[in-house]
Amino acid sequence: MRPELDVTELSVLDDLHHPAGVVLQSEEAISRIFGSGRTLSLVNGASSGLKAVIMAYGDTGAVVIPRNGHRAILEGLILSGATPKYVCPQENEGLFVPAAPQAYEGFGDNHLLVMLAETYEGFVRDYSGLKTRNPILADEAHGGHLRFCSVPSALDWADYTVHGAHKTLGSMTQSGFLHFRRSDQVQRVRRELSLLVSTSPSWLMLGSLEQAAVWWRGFTDPEYWTKRCLRLKERIDGLPGMRAVHETGGSLFCDPFRLCIRLEQAADGRVLGNELQNRFGIELEMTNQGSLVAILTPFDPEGSWDKLYRALKELGRAYGLQDRFGTTAAWLPELPEQCMTPRQAHQADHRRVAMQSAEGHICADIVAAYPPGIPLLYPGERIGRQQARMLKALTEGASRTQGIQDGQILVVNE
Ligand SMILES: Cc1ncc(COP(=O)(O)O)c(C=O)c1O
């Protein structure tokens, strides 16, 4: 870290909100590397890009969103006042994958379609076959590198693509990209982005974004890395009780750099994750009861993948894992009754109630496990029996939850 690079707005620098100098040059260079119509650098995470686009469209109609979308999408709805319509994910051997393209058909005009292009687990959906006149916003926060691999990137089919560049591209934490297919949409969205972003952006962060893009421009051997990742996945497949995800079909793909391991039914991924952390010093991206998720990158130190493999092997042995793969399907509760828009519920008079007595009330907050930050309950939804059941499971299972405090959640005063 070189703190002398952390400068303030010197006159030779530029204005992120109205770039005309070095920021503009940097964004144009990044745009050329990704092949977009225009790219904006984000210093407030992928979240800020998602929210800004939703805000730009929010008052023109409804917003169609993936029910397994990140909370930033929901926050965009709260900020814009838009009415959500939902598309539910598909289930794939106990894991959720992005909805099929057909699920987004038939919504009529005047809708912003928001797609989850890549899930936390590394399932990538190619929506290029979707026929629609509606604008498309793709949350490809986890797939900034796909442009440089052989898997389809949302840049090929979305009007707006958001990358959490810090997740896989190697830029500084909190930095990201908002790519536009057409540059004539920039003004409209930038007005909203300016409401969300500091007037004192970090130059370190902005510089790291350009550096990361330049690094990926030089990433000329994706096949070599894809094969290396595949080899690791195949070695893990050979361990009892563990199966890496790497087969998909149709418009569904797997991110070669994402390692998602399905576990046999007697294993608990959260326990294995703690063991990896405490005994082996390995921090995974996410752990669930039935799966482990890690991000592989070309920046990983030599030997680190082997270290992970050996740790998994040892844990598998210690916990007596065997190939007892069940057929338990991932379960999504029925969509609850939507009584208010997320914004109305967010602004409504509210109070706290104990989770045990939450059923029947209208939720006033975002309730989610983090990671992955996918809301279980949206503000404005009436908590039904299935949601109450999920709330209980959430507090018992997830390591961190949002929207639950001291066993209580916020509900609307009716
Ligand atoms: C799918 C998805 N979209 C958006 C975000 C938000 O990204 P950021 O933390 O860069 O704001 C995340 C964060 O984990 C995410 O998983």
Image (cartoon, rainbow, N blue to C red):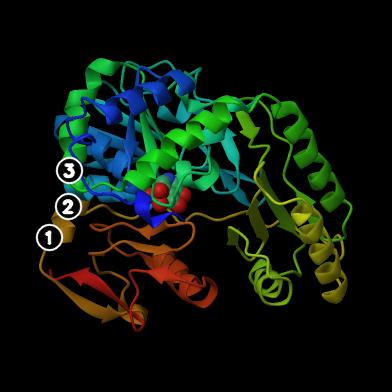
Q: Quadrant of residue 61?
A: top left
Image height check: is 231 above or below 343? Answer: above
The residue at which mark 1 appears reads as: 347
Quote the CA–CA distance across marks 3 and 2: 8 Å
Badges 2 and 1: C-beta atoms under 8 Å apart?
yes
The residue at which mark 3 appears reads as: 80
**Residue 165: x percent and y percent?**
46, 41
Residue 86: give its label: none
Image height check: is 367 above or below 192? Answer: below
**Residue 344: x percent and y percent?**
14, 54
State which tag comes first along the sequence, 3 or 2: 3
Instruction: Give the residue type at disc 2.
Output: Arg
Instruction: Give the residue type at disc 1.
Output: Gln
Quote the CA–CA distance across marks 2 and 1: 6 Å
Q: Image point 28% across, 49% down: which residue? A: 7
Crowding around mark 3 (Cα neighbors within 10 Å: few <14, some 14 to 19, many 20+) is many
Q: Image point 32% across, 44% down: which residue? A: 203
Instruction: Give the residue type at disc 3.
Output: Ser
The residue at which mark 2 appears reads as: 343
Q: Is residue 128 left or right of residue 388?
A: right
Badges 3 and 2: C-beta atoms under 8 Å apart?
yes
What is the secondary structure assignment of the residue under circle 1?
helix
Q: Is residue 109 left or right of residue 288?
A: left
Front-lying residue, 244 or 9: 9
